Amino acid sequence: MLSLGHYIEIGAAKAPEDERKQVRVANAFGLVSNVLNAPFIPVLLVGWPTTGPVVLVQVYALVAWSTVTALQGLGLRTAARVLAIFAATTHIVAACALVGNVAPVWSVLATVVLVPFLIFPARQRALMIASAVGVGLAEIASWTTFANAEPGVHFDPLAADALRLTVPLALAGFPALIGVYYHVITTRTEEALAAERARSEALLLNVLPASIAKRLLAGEKPIADRFDDVTVLFSDIVGFTKVSEKTPPAELVAILDDLFSAFDIEIERRGLEKIKTIGDAYMVAGGIPTPRADHVEAIVELGLAMARVMDERTDRYGLSIRIGVHTGPVVAGVIGHRKFTYDLWGDTVNTASRMESHGVPGRVHVSAAVEERLRGRFNFEPRGTIEVKGKGPMQTFLVTKATSGNARANDT
């Protein structure tokens, strides 16, 4: 048996998100109309055959509204809306012609005038206004023509009383029922939108730093900042290309997931910001978007931790890792229209990338700027002057371990 909820939902699932409310209201409109009309058919049959035409008009309404619902189910939403207004209007006008001055049936059209604004979406504004105007003109014509006219058929006293009762019920009950239901579905829609907004915000927080996500959600565009003191780490898995050639896809993805998930944990422990992954490459920054005094130290600690993560899995995967670090100014911002990315630009980023590509597997390779900032807190092995692609000769260093005084690094 079709429940009330299922009846109201007929055709809603096939409609675009912004039309589902109108579909449900149209279904509710038809349901209420049939509920108000159907009970009076047996009452009117008391006066049969003289009341036969009125019964037929009521049956017409029931068939018309059933057709509206069927059209909704077929996805013919515009046809259903037009038929809904046409059926309601013609049903009432025909009833006016038969009832005459027995009951002010024409006044029910005052409620029907509101229906186009509830069942047509904004993009069908022309149909919405044309329908409302048409109903309004039909009301005026019915009032001037039938308000004082003799009834078209003879009514039994019981049937006449039933008709007189129908009008105030329709005038009061129909708007009230539609109003209550419209409030219910509006509330439901708002709750669904709020839930969807919360999911979107949660997703945004997963791909952007929290402070950047809040600025984006607040409508700030473009988001672009300059930071004068940031440390950038790049890593690349050595031997991954060869391994990928002979490893099944699922297993290959599982390897990367294991490694990057372990890296993510180390990043979270230190409050650093993962910027992106590109293939088997991994980029992290410290000191953005919230500046902090210890970002150089925290990034080097992370590099040592990442090297340990890889060492623990060397026998399992046969892979190693190169890690490069540099510190300096960067420009950071959000790019993209639908898929947002928080990224960094500048010479600091390029130099950190060069530290990685010219590095030594299993070691953290840093620039002289990093060594100068951390001198005395970490042990460094000078590499002397090396020729760095795109940079020329540079003094670089390999981090061996933290000094004994660096408790935080030792704890990691």
Image (spheres, rainbow, N blue to C red):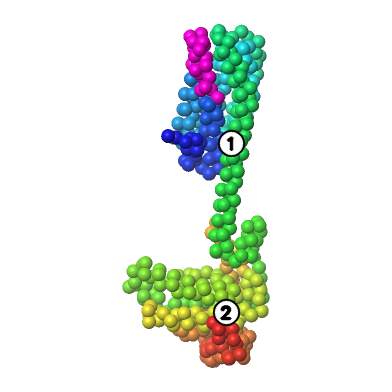
Rate crowding at label 2 as few (under 14), some (14 to 19) or many (20 or more) other CA atoms within 10 Å: many
- Specify the amino acid type for callout 2: Ile
The verdict on residue 53 being magenta is yes
Q: Pointer 1: residues within 10 angstroms few (<14), some, or many (20+)?
A: some
N-terminal of the two: label 1 or label 2? 1
Figure quadrant of residue 255: bottom left
Residue at image point 57% right, 44% down = 188
Residue 299 disc label: 2
Q: Which residue is mark 1?
A: 181
Q: Residue at x 58, y 10 (%)?
A: 157
Image position, residue 327 (x, y; %): 61, 80
The CA distance from mark 1 to mark 2 is 58 Å
Residue 61 vertical position relative to residue 242 in the rendered view, above or below: above
Most frequent secondary structure within the magenta stretch: helix
Q: Nearer the viewer, mark 1 or mark 2?
A: 1
> Hey, which quadrant is residue 343 in on the image?
bottom right
Q: Is residue 172 left or right of residue 389?
A: right
Q: Which residues are magenta?
A: 36-58
Q: Looking at the rendered structure, which numbered label has been put on residue 213?
A: none
